[in-house]
Image: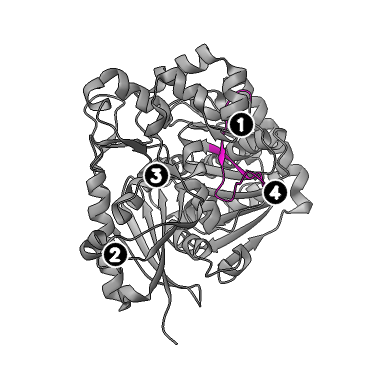
Amino acid sequence: MANRYLLGFDVGSSSVKASLVNADSGKCVATAFYPEKEAPIMAVKAGWAEQDPQMWWDNAKLSLQKIMKESGATAEEIKAVGISYQMHGLVCVDKDLKALRPAIIWCDSRAVPYGEKAFKDLGADKCLSHLLNSPGNFTAAKLAWVKENEPELYSKIYKVMLPGDYIAMRLSGVANTTVSGLSEGMFWDFKNNQVADFLMDYYGFDHSLIADIVPTFAEQSVVSAEAAAEMGLKAGTPITYRGGDQPNNALSLNVLNPGEIAATAGTSGVVYGVLGDVNYDPQIRVNTFAHVNHTADQTRLGVLLCINGTGILNAWTHRNITPEIGYAEMNDLAASVPIGSEGVTVIPFGNGAERVLENKEIGCSINGLNFNKHNKAHLVRAAQEGIVFSFCYGMEIMQQMGMDIKKIHAGKANMFLSPLFRNTLAGVSGATIELYDTDGSVGAAKGAGLGAGIYANASEAFASLDKLEVIEPDAQNRAAYRAAYEAWKETLKKNM
């Protein structure tokens, strides 16, 4: 029996990763990313962040060439292509589908005033009930900046797209997008289930700028002869899935149903939960987008919580408090102290303004320190507990929106390598944590399999997902975890 492979790309701001998944076994057979050192981000002015879309394409090509060589797979054996990508970016192309300027990426903040003015002028009720968010610093506001500051260039724009749309366009020669993508750019009206005409009209955008809408899981386009020759693919190979990095991370962890949570805890932390009803946070402390499996008939929204001060605090703690030992030994040291760190609390928000705190920048603080009782073990444990408690604080907002959180899915990486971190999160939230071996490019490949009809459903697509560990809530210590969390919340109130 001939091999059948699925190709997944993950277009990040630091690299582009490609993975080849055997469609029948579900196992990843090769993976690579370029560049091997972090990709450059252009910052011409303070607060700006741009990347050349051609760089993404070049890195996708290099990653693909490496995995094809490693696996020995042929172009004919690749049955479908899926794409994951950095969210909220803006790519502008002309009628020849050439990029007119560098992409304005997710961490560029120049458009904040344009989003804030729209929110004020249109009104909070209108924006939240239709967009589920403020226009904020998302793609539509970035386009408004281009319109005002680069009018000559703006007049040449044929289509606007997100980074994943651009890669799909380069592969196929066809410009299209998805509802999930439009929602993350603030171009989607959830109340009327259509492009957000009211926001388009407010900014003065021509409606023709929006590319044709295709389903998230379906044959969206096919690899063109030109791209096939350049990339080493077969012309006509279907492109059958795309999703923003956080919705796609949730997909890769098989998080598709209401109440399920996908979490990551790297330098910053993300909690992404699925909601089965249209809802939003009136204070915009979390953001709500269409999840990859959202349709007009089935509401599936992704609620996105971002905590800036996550792994960066743990790394700071290691560097400055326990530099003489490794992370595993540091975790053991922290575990030698009781739950609640005997009254020491760390407020972990030392990496910029936090959306969950309504964009306040309160910094990091250590509270309750007693020089006669506490030592560095208390500080290390309190730091990890503080990170967990910040996750739980955001998850409470999700619960207020109607989400019943029973299970947290995560990759076994970064902070989730710490038993103390995992046990505290399960203990405070009451949710079971399941740890898996997967990543975004593998998720994109599996998504391609779903979109191509190779898999009948998600259960089949993710049957081979490696579950590495399950952490159940510790019922015996539940009261101690909750007491520590409530004490942390009281300290947070004082700091705000």
Residue depth check, mark 2 versus mark 4: number of the one nearer the observer = 2
Q: Earlier in the sequence, mark 3 or mark 2?
A: 2
Q: Earlier in the sequence, mark 3 or mark 4?
A: 3
Residue depth check, mark 3 versus mark 4: number of the one nearer the observer = 3
Helix, strand or loop at mark 2? helix
In front of the other: 334 or 263: 263
10 Å neighbourhood of mark 2: few (<14), some, or many (≥20)? many
The Cα–Cα distance between marks 3 and 4, rounded to whole angstroms, is 32 Å
The Cα–Cα distance between marks 1 and 2, rounded to whole angstroms, is 40 Å
Q: Main secondary structure of the magenta part?
A: loop
Q: How many marks?
A: 4
Residue behind mark 1: 192
Q: Where is residue 276 shown, x and y percent of the image?
A: 69, 43
Q: Which residues are magenta?
A: 282-305
Residue shown at the point (30%, 79%) measured from the top left: 72
**Residue 78 visible in the picture:** yes
Determine which of the numbered discs, if any, sits on residue 86 in the image.
3
Which amino acid, by three-letter code, is at mark 3?
Gln
Q: Residue furthest bottom?
A: 1
Residue behind mark 2: 64
In front of the other: 158 or 403: 158
Q: Earlier in the sequence, mark 3 or mark 1?
A: 3
In front of the other: 420 or 237: 237
Task: Using the image, determine if residue 134 lies above or below residue 237.
Answer: above
Q: Earlier in the sequence, mark 2 or mark 4?
A: 2
Determine which of the numbered discs, if any, sits on residue 427 in the image.
4
Q: Are the residues flagged by discs 1 and 4 in contact, CB closer than 8 Å?
A: no
**Quadrant of the snapshot with the C terminus:** top right
Helix, strand or loop at mark 4? helix
Which amino acid, by three-letter code, is at mark 1?
Asn
Helix, strand or loop at mark 1? loop
